[in-house]
């Protein structure tokens, strides 16, 4: 089974410049995935992509941000589907499919882009949504850095308005300075730490191949400085069966979005 998570940047639409939907569809179709977690849907981009790549879609709408979706192989039996009923800034979609190994829960999420404390709470809601599921995946653009890496250089490279998104909040009068970028403990990694503390396994950290950074692509973006923001987390029982994980860097992916997709292969 092959799974993918992909932030497609504003639904693939670039205003008067047209769309990147064909390129996005090509990136997905070339990998022949069984499950795709999509973030930043807009308009009819979700239904269009699902039809184009021949998959079924479960979409979670957003009250403040952008919808997300889970696409599944049409040959699979869907046991349950819907949104995670929490006030996410964007949204989270939850699908349970039947596999030979048992029911598999898949959650596509897109965490808050600006505030680390909000991302932490959203990550805890994802843990609650997984519940007691033995086989579960949480995939998506989690918009946060991991607690195992020294992020000093990449944060120093960001303009201050974007750098502060990844630093712990301080009271008025105690503004962040460049010194706050050095020690890893001052970087806000609480969302990833919450998933790790719940026993979820960072799939790329466990079996990943190649460089871990998922943004930016050749499309660029001032808010990125060579960062891993897109993740796959698996329950321990599922993580045992993950065979590979990689960041998909191809010429098509370079122009399809500002994020690279993450792909994993699982024997289940």
Image: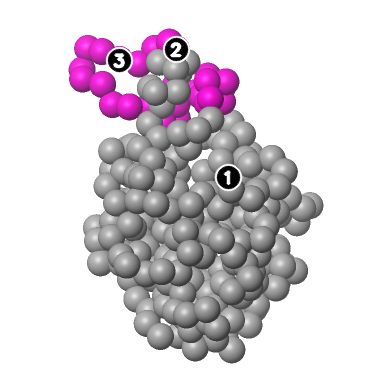
- What is the quadrant of the N terminus in the image? bottom right
Residue that carries the numbered disc 3 in the rendered image? 175
Which residue is at 53% across, 60% downward?
239
Is residue 163 within the magenta segment? yes
Give left or right: position of 248 versus 187.
right
Is disc 1 placed on a helix, strand or loop? helix
Spot the residue most to the right: 251
Residue that carries the numbered disc 2 in the rendered image? 178
Is residue 248 within the magenta segment? no
Which residue is at 40% across, 15% downward?
180
Which residues are the magenta region?
150-179
Colour approach in the figure? one colour
Disc 2 to disc 3: CB gap under 8 Å: no
Label 2 vs label 1: CA separation?
28 Å
Compared with residue 179, is residue 135 higher up or lower down, i.e. above or below? below
Is disc 2 placed on a helix, strand or loop? helix
Q: Residues within 10 Å of mark 1 (few under 14, many from 20)?
A: some
* Percent coordinates x, y for residue 91 in the rendering: 35, 61
Compared with residue 56, is residue 153 higher up or lower down, i.e. above or below? above
Residue that carries the numbered disc 1 in the rendered image? 205
């Amino acid at each position: 089974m092959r799974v993918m998570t992909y932030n497609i940047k504003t639904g693939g639409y670039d205003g008067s410049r047209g769309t990147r939907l064909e390129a996005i569809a090509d990136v997905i179709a070339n990998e022949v995935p069984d499950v795709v977690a999509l973030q930043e849907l807009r308009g009819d981009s979700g239904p269009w992509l699902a039809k184009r790549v021949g998959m079924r879609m479960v979409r979670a709408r957003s009250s403040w941000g952008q919808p997300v979706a889970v696409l599944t192989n049409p040959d699979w039996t869907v046991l349950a589907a819907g949104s995670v009923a929490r006030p996410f800034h964007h949204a989270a979609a939850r699908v349970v499919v039947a596999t030979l190994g048992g029911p598999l829960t898949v959650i596509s999420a897109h965490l808050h882009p600006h505030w680390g404390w909000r991302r932490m709470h959203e990550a805890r809601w994802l843990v609650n949504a997984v519940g007691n599921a033995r086989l579960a995946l949480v995939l998506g653009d989690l918009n946060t850095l991991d607690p195992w890496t020294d992020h000093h250089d990449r944060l120093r490279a960001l303009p201050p308005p974007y750098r502060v998104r990844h630093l712990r909040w301080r009271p008025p009068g105690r503004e962040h300075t460049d010194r706050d970028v050095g020690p890893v403990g001052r970087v806000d990694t609480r969302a990833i730490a919450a998933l790790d503390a719940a026993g979820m396994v960072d799939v790329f950290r466990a079996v990943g191949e190649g460089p871990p950074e998922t943004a930016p692509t050749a499309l660029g973006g001032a808010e990125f400085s060579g960062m891993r923001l897109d993740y796959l987390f698996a329950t321990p029982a599922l993580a045992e069966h993950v065979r590979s994980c990689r960041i998909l860097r191809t010429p098509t992916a370079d122009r399809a979005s500002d994020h690279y997709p993450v792909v994993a292969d699982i024997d289940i």
